Each structure stands twice: as C-alpha cells, then as structure tokens.
Image (tube, coloured by chain):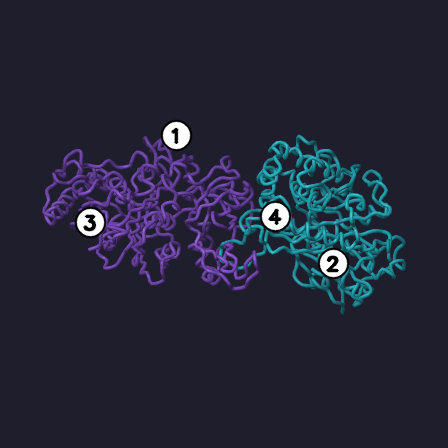
Chain colours: A cyan, B purple
Amino acid sequence: MTSHGICDRVAIVSMGCTPFGEHWDKGADDLMLDAVKATLAPTGLALQDMDAFWLGTYMSGISGLTMSRPLRISGKPVSRVENMCATGSEALRSACYAVASGAYDVAMAVGVEKLKDSGYSGLTRASIPGDGTGGTLGTTTAPANFSLLGPAYAEKYGVSQSELKDVLTRIAWKNHQNGARNPRAQFRKEVAPETIARSPLVAGNLGVFDCSGVSDGAAAAIVVRAEDAHRYCELPLYVKALSLVTGAADGNVDPNYDFTSFPEVVASAREAYAQAGVTDPRSEIAMAEVHDCFTVTELVLMEDLGFADRGMAWKECAAGAFDLTGRLPVNPDGGLKAFGHPVGASGLRMLFECWLQLRVEAPADRRIPDPRGRLGLTQNLGGGPGECVSFVSLVGTERGA
Amino acid sequence: MNGLISLGVYIPRYRLQREAIAAALGTGGGRGSRSVASYDEDAASLGVEAARKALSGVGHRPERLYFATPAPPYLDKSNAAVIAAALGLDRSVFAADFGGAPRSGFGAMVAAAEADAPALALLSDLRTGRPGSSDESSGGDAAAALLFGPGTEEDPVIARVIAMAATTEEFLERWRAPGAQHSRTWEERFGEHVYGPLAEESFTAALKQANRTPSQVDRLLTSGLATRAVRQFARTSGVRAEAVAADRWNELGNCGTAELGVQLADALATAGPGELIALVLLADGATTVLLETTEHVTQRRPDPSVAAQVEAGAPISYATFLTWRGVLDREPPRRPEPDGPAAPPAHRSAAYKHSFQATRCTACGTVNVPPSRVCYSCSQIDEMAPAPLSTTLGTVVTFTVDRLAFTPSPPMIAVVVDFDGGGRFRCELADADPDEVHIGMRVEMSFRRLLTADGVHNYFWKAKPLRSSQTNSIEENA
C-alpha cells in the first residue's frame, strides 16, 4: 500500500466534547449543537466560517442533513460518514484530508450518537434484507464477538482462565479509576476489583463491568492548514498520522486467523508509525486512547499497537504499565469503559483527550507525566475480531519535529 | 416394486422425564421419559436429519421425496421442497408433502415402495398435547427416513415388500380441526372396539397375499395413536408371543407418524436374513405391510441405531419443554427481534443456505465459507467449484457463551469451527451445554430452524457436538 501521509500539513485548533451518558433530555440535534458550540467558542469562529463539514454517525441520522438542518448550516458541503464504531475517526480523517488537499482552509469534524432512545441496552443494527445466514456478525452480540478473543488468547499463551479474568478486571478497574476523575465521563465512580470480577456474565468471561457504557454524546474538532494554526490557537495539535485499515473480513473465513490479535490494528499502527516516523512507540508516545469496547479488546490492543510483546500484555497490564502513572498511560480519560461509547462520537472523544493531555489542560488528578516532545495516539475500531475497521492517529504539539 | 435400501432415524437429543409433569401440575406424567425436539427443530428439520442418515454412504439418490407429518412448518408452501434443498437433491426430484396423521406416514412409505424410481419416504412428528394431557406425556418427537429403490450391487435391497393390505373406515376416534393446537379423542374403549376387526382384516389379508400364517411372522411391529387398541391387537394377532416387538414408549414415547419407522429401525438393528416383519398401523382403518429381510440386512444397519440415540439423550425441565413448545409465553431477551430472511437473497444463496455448499478455489484449493467469488487466500476471481460441507466434521477454534443474544433458549453458544480439509465457519452450537464447550471440541453440522419472523422460517446450519455414543460419524460412514 502506498500512502502519502500528511504529517504536519494540518492542525487541530479547537475541540469540544459533551459529557457522555444517558441524555434523556437531549436529542442528537442538541448534542451536536453542544459540541459544535463548545468547539467554536474559544476560536471566535462562527459556523459560517467553516468551509466544509463531516458528520460521523452510526445510526442517529442519514445524510449531511442530519446536521445541516438543526444547525441551519446553509450553502456548505456537509457529508455524513459511517464506519461502525470508527465513525468519529472517519469524520476526522475526511476533514483532515480535505484540508491537506488544499480544497478547504477550515473544516469541521463532528461525531454524534444517540443510543439511549432505542429502548435496548447494547448496540442495535439497521436492518438490511438478507438471506438469513446472518453474516458473521449477525446473530451474536458485540460482547460475544469480542469475547471470542479470551479463550483463544488464554489457550495460545498458557494463561489460566482465572489469571485472564484477573487481568481483565484490572483493566476495567484502571479505566474506572481514570474515569472517576473525568467530569465528562459516563461513570464517575471507582469500582472495586471484587465488584468488577463478580458482575453478572454477559458473554464468555466478560461481565457487565467488562463492557463499555452505552451512552449518548457528541464531540467536534476544527481542522485548518498547519501554517494557519496559530491564527486560531496558541497551542494547536499537529496531525502526524492518520491510518485507516478495513480488513477483508477473512478472520471468520480463514483458519490461519487465531483470534488473539486484530491484524487490521497491526496494519494501521504500522502505517501510522511510518507516516509519523515513529520507530519506538513505547518511548515516543506519551499516552494512548484505545478502543476498549471490552476489557479483552484493550488487552489484545496493547500487543497489536506494539506497546507490549506478544503474549506479554496480560503481565504488563497486571503490573500497571498502562496505568495513569505507568510507563505508557492508556485511556487516561476512562476509555470507552468509563467515559462511555456513543459510537459515532468515540473517535473524536479519544482525540479530545489528546487535546487536553498534550496541551497540559487535563485536570491535575488525572494528568499524565510530562508529554512534551512526545505524541498522543488514538486507536478506534469498528466490527470485531476477524472482521474489522481500525483507525490509528498520531498527534503532537510540535510541528516539524 | 421397490425394496428397502436404507433406513435412517433421528431422535432429537432432549428428554422430558414424565415425573416432571406431575411434579409441576400435580397430575399427569407417569414413568419414563419422552423425546423432545429442541427449540430450533421442527418436523422439516427432523426429517432432514433422518434423511441424511438414510442417505449417508448410499449411492442412490432419490428421485421422489414424500414427506409426511401432522406438524408441518408451512402450509401452502411445500416442506418437502425445503427438505430436498437441504439434502442437496437434484432439481429434477419430485418432492411432495403428505399432510396429516400416522396414516399419511404409512401412505408415504407405500408410495415410495410403489414408485418406479428410487424414492424416499420421510415420516416426521412433533407430538404435543395440553399440559397434563396423555398426549403430552406419551408423545415423542422423531423422524424416520426410508429409502426405497430397485437395489444395485453397491446398494442392495435389505428388505423386500412382499404384501400390503389396508382397510379404511370412517369413524370418530381422534381428530383436530385446522389451526387447533391439540387433538381430541373419543373414549378409548370405543376405538378399541372399532380397530380390532379392522386390524385383523388387513393383517389377515396381507398374510394371505404372501401365503404366510401369523405363526411365521418373526417380528410384529404395531403402531398407532390409539394405544389400547394397538396393544390389544398385538395380543390377539396370533403371532408368537416372542415375535411381538417391544416399543420405545418408556424412553421416547409414541412418536406418532414416525413411530413405525422407529420400530422398524429397532427391528433392523438385530434382524437376520430371511425374517418376516409385519408392520401394522391402526389409523383411520388399518394397514399392514409385510417385509422380508434379505441376506444384505446385516450389511446396512440403521446408523446410529435407535438404541444409541436413546442412550445419548439429555434431560430438560418441564418449564423448558413448555417454553420451546410456545405454551409458556416467557419474557424475551431485551433485544430487537431478528429479521427473517428475504426471498431474493435466500434464493440466490440457496445452495449455501439450504445444503451448506461452500466453494473451493480451483486455483489454490482453499475452501471459502460462505461461498465467495473471490478467493480470500489467492484473490483469484470466479475460479470456484462447489464444496459441499454438510457432512464434514470440524473442530472448535474458539467459542463464547452469549447471554444477551436473542434466543428462545438462552444462553446462545457460539463457536468458530475449522472444517477438516479446510474452511472456517462461525455459528451457533446446538444441543450443547455451556460448560462442555471447549477449544478442540469435535463437531458435526446440523440443519436447524434459526428463527421464525413474519411466518418465515429461517433454516440454516449449526454445529453440534460429535457425541462419543455415535457408533460412526457421518463422515466415516460416507
């Protein structure tokens, strides 16, 4: 794959993010507007100053009208994009490439999802006429799809079921610790490991506390040409890498796939590191926001992103390597686990945490160690083991390092 | 006339202990157990499983398929066509449904025997009754498939039909109006009174055709839903006492339309050459068929045997039984109801959906499941040949127990299966308990009804554990 990265060609100059949670009193329209308003405010820009919009939503609306109508955006290109749970990242990627191409000077990426109006917990799907053989993501639920990783990982690396459960519990515990310090997070309480471990099983060895929150929310970003960044903001975030890999969905078809990794994540990380010139992610990355839809996903991602050696992530997680104070803080905002997961907004929510942390604006009680000169990573995933979409971005506060 | 080439019986895995009925209702029940079709099985899927056993290892492909059941999954639409598709039979096969009770099962068998081409008679039943009723506790679910044909060197006739005689009589003994959930019966003593002479008449006529006497009968198999009349005839038929075959009431119950097939399979499991077997059915008159086993009967025993399938049974609670039968309207999982299949895509993928036919890349040999026009391994386009997988065994690679999924029988077990010889498939695991599933578990495929939406049954394939009690796997037998 030839991919010409756009390292340092565009910058994020403002971001906004609503609290995530059960917004019984707000619709998708309100959430979008709240995020957009918060994003515009510090810049002095107005909606009409944007040249183009990309709206990411999984199932809260169809077409650009989903946003242009409630926000009364007139005479501008507004596109709705969708790539399952990587939808918010897809919106960002589109806006960045549009500006990098020279087509626009100022673009806005917005992600929104209103899940709590469905009446169901967990994700529901749009219905597409089919032959009833279900596609491989058809019958089982999302937690079940991801829980396929557990037995395979344990078998391959000789980890006992109880050892694995302990590690998953620790990942949930860590993300709840971080989320408890985040005013925008859906769950703001520390949770005792015993409570996590004893929570009712949802699928495989994943309990209720191993699953991310179903929530409503929105996030937004303004993207400009890197050379213009300081016109809008003192400390912009330069986009170092954007990599999206959509798998051939052959993990459920090809016996060579072993359900202990996401090959799409490995490929998108490799690509992103190449675009940004990262050779040692463990030292060059200051923090990572990763797609911890389920605790076991975060475990496997640590290896796929190169944060831990193969078969070692379970030990490193247990030892606290990815804690807020560990060698590489992962999900300092609480992650999908505690911050919540409004599908279309999550990718941008991850970037929002990089925005806060790299610019040293995160509250002191969950601030990562000095990030200067280092990068923030977001990893956002749609689909499941065997067939997924993976996005990895790298951002930093220094241009042309 | 055709001879019997092969016989397959399918007994679903689950058993309801009759004592559980009395424990719940304070009445009904009795001793022993009855067989119960799982929530994802119906008369058509039971029939498919029985037919797969009958056709396993047989070169004959039926050109006629006659499906008889009193519990058809569809009206207006042919269930026999669904079954023919699941069996992967050629489009030129004539498949037709025989509606109605046990007599139609006998009718299907006679029609198959009298056909001028290889023909398969499929007898399938799901017995039901009001909670606490005799029909509920005494019924059993099963299917039997009888393959008839002229016989060849490779697929010889194992039993010849040497006589058939019938009496037909109109009287009120058992009836059910269309749409009614349960059948009703007149007083049993009346049935006994009417059936006695009818049975004797058909039995005598058949023996006379064959120029035999009752004492020459080696095995007398009697069936019918009028239990008293059936047992009475067995006693007074004039056959030697030791020739009266035992039924499987105590373990399986009376399998109604499929019962004569179950009994015949039991008989053929031990019958030697040259035995005279009389099949007598009491239903709206009486029918008798006399079969004589050939020297080949020892070469093709029903496999797996009824005894082995009885052995492999697993218990379910009465509440589960009632739930599966739709009698107990329980709270569904809080998930959107799955959609039913749409007609055009289901038609396009019929070979995969119904007979589980995948594709094999002719360029690199890789098996692609589901069928694909582009090989996932070598990316060649449109270089595919059919790869039938319905009888291929596989191994579980990883698994999960989904406690949130929409299913009438939570939790749903999902497995990733790698097939022997290539191909991977992710599906539900049927007939299994959550604590027995493990990496490395051996599985076989089973035709099931995934769900019903808007009256459309979504038939597809699931894996199920390969049980050690099976004497031979389907594959090894083939």
Q: Nearer the viewer, mark 1 or mark 4?
A: 4
Q: Are marks 3 and 2 on the same chain?
A: no
- What amino acid type should be assigned to the residue bearing mark 3? Arg
Q: Are marks 2 and 1 on the same chain?
A: no
Distance between the Cα atoms at labels 4 and 3?
Answer: 56 Å
Disc 3: which residue = B160
**Residue at left offset 87%, top offset 61%:** A227
Q: Chain of mark 2?
A: A
Q: Chain of mark 1?
A: B
Within the image, what quadrant is residue B227 found in? top left
Disc 4: which residue = A385
Q: Chain of mark 3?
A: B
Q: Are marks 2 and 4 on the same chain?
A: yes
How busy is the neighbourhood of tag 4: few (under 14 within 10 Å), some, or many (20 plus)?
Answer: many
Q: Are marks 1 and 3 on the same chain?
A: yes
1 and 4 marks in contact (CB < 8 Å)? no
4 and 3 marks in contact (CB < 8 Å)? no
How busy is the neighbourhood of tag 1: few (under 14 within 10 Å), some, or many (20 plus)?
Answer: few
Q: Is residue B418 above or below residue B315?
A: below
- What amino acid type should be assigned to the residue bearing mark 2? Arg
Q: Is residue B108 left or right of residue A200?
A: left
Disc 1: which residue = B23
Where does residue B101 sit, x and y in percent of width and height? 28, 49
Where does residue A319 sit, x and y in percent of width and height? 73, 33
Mark 1 secondary-structure assignment: helix
Which of disc 3 and disc 1 is earlier in sequence?
1
Disc 2: which residue = A93
Distance between the Cα atoms at labels 2 and 1?
Answer: 64 Å
Mark 3 secondary-structure assignment: strand
Q: Quadrant of the N terminus of chain B?
A: bottom left
Where does residue B37 sit, x and y in percent of width and height? 39, 43
Which is more toward the observer, A283 or B170? A283
